[in-house]
Image: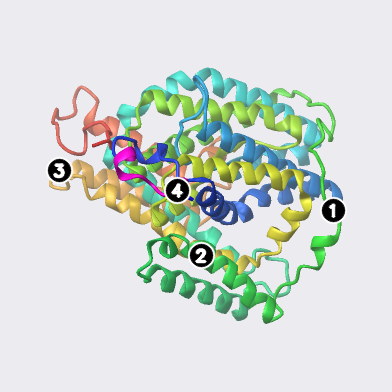
Amino acid sequence: MHQDNINPERDAHISAEHQYLGMNKNILYGLQHVLTMYGGIIAPPLIIGAAAGLDASEIGLLVAAALFVGGLATVIQTIGFKYFGAKLPIVQGVSFAGVATILAIVSTGGGLPSAFGAVIVASLIGLLITPFFAKIIRFFPPVVTGCVITMIGISLTPVAIRWIMGGNPKAENWGDPTNTGLAVITLAIVIIFSMLQNQILRRLAILAAIVLGTVIAYIAGFTDFSSVSTGPIFAFPSFFHFGSPVFEFSAILSMVIVTLVIMTETTADIIAIGEIVGTKVDSKRIGDGLRADMLSSAISPIFGSFMQTAFAQNVGLVAITGIKSRFVVATAGGILIILGLLPVIGRFVASIPMPVLGGAGIVLFGTVAASGIRTLAKVDYNDHKNLIIVATSLTIGMIPIVNQEFYAQFPTWVKTLLHSGISSACITAILLNIIFNHLPFSKKSVDVATTPINSGH
């Protein structure tokens, strides 16, 4: 098909994210995005559903809702309309940042209705304060964004390790060397495909590794697809299936803190993807992206889902494949919507062994960190201030990764704000950059570390 080929003359003046690759490639590369983030998007509803005491069929509804809303949010973010959507290849899904807070709301007697009510109000508050957040772009020079992007990759490493070990700490095969062997085989396939001369095959390295890794696991008897035939084939997410939202002040307040964390992380992801794509990210684009984030979060409880955010693991996929078209990711959003409507397909994809995803995740998440390191290479380290910013931010960002109990005795709002290595590093880097480069007593100097971001060349 002619439409599947990029025309150099036609696309010479079109930014990479706006290039249309054709439906065939959109579906193929879009499916790769879905497989990459599938484990991450279904984990929060599985955890929350179990904590809320739901049975398997109701947890299935939470999972279906997460897929459906994630797809809807992804389409809004990539295709966009006036004031909503960054129009960048960003995949949206349920945020892990809110899981601990939602579990606290559910366990203190409020139940899911209180959690849904808190998400709705907090998201609307986030929508209102977006103009403020969008203006902080000048506080994100390479010395800050490099730290944050690097920390995104590092903080995702435990996710890959958990997948490699089996995904479920309570399972009998948790940490079994066989799981590691399966992950190593998948990683080897990624490396082999990445060494091929054919560019298309190189770009499909992750998808090919996941598919082949699953086939190998099936032949070896490490996975089965018997659960695929159990349950309905088609099911539309029910409106307020778990009850009308309940609005409790304490629940809303704790969720507002989560919202601030999510907005910080989403801002970092938008900047990161802008760096990878090589396109300009300004305050308007960040504002449009955050509004799409908050809008999708506000409507998600209607269908039975939670706060939405940009998925960092898919940032890595864009970096490693070089597929920068937002229409590919919009297609991934469409696939997610279909998965949300067809639980049978969702059950099939859920049968992919976690170690296979973990093997691919090693490369994906490492690529995000490598992108951050590449950004940090632009920083002038002859100026000791920048060295201190990088060293301190990365180390503080590592604290919750190295020791998850570090903030256990702190107030809830501190734990919520700093539980993520991404938000810890981001807050530290921004504050130190302001202290060293923006306050009246700081030395006034213009160098590569203090110039505004403008990746478009």
How crowded is the residue under tag 4: few (<14 C-alpha within 10 Å), some, or many (20+)? few
Can you tell which of label 1 and label 4 is closer to the viewer? 4
How crowded is the residue under tag 1: few (<14 C-alpha within 10 Å), some, or many (20+)? few
Q: Secondary structure at mark 3?
A: loop
- Tell me how far mark 3 sits from mark 1, CA to CA: 57 Å
* Vertical placement of residue 349 versus 287, above or below: below
Residue 149 covered by magenta stretch:
no
Mark drawn on residue 383: 3
Relative to 188, is 31 on the left or the right?
right
Can you tell which of label 2 and label 1 is closer to the viewer? 2
The earlier-in-sequence mark between 3 and 2 is 2
Can you tell which of label 4 and label 2 is closer to the viewer? 4
Q: Which residue does the numbered mark 1 point to in the structure image?
A: 56
The earlier-in-sequence mark between 2 and 1 is 1
Q: Which residue does the numbered mark 2 point to in the structure image?
A: 360
Residue that appears at 68% across and 41% down? 337
Can you tell which of label 4 and label 3 is closer to the viewer? 4
- Tell me how far mark 4 sits from mark 2, CA to CA: 32 Å
Give the main secondary structure of the magenta stretch: helix
- Tell me how far mark 4 sits from mark 3, CA to CA: 52 Å
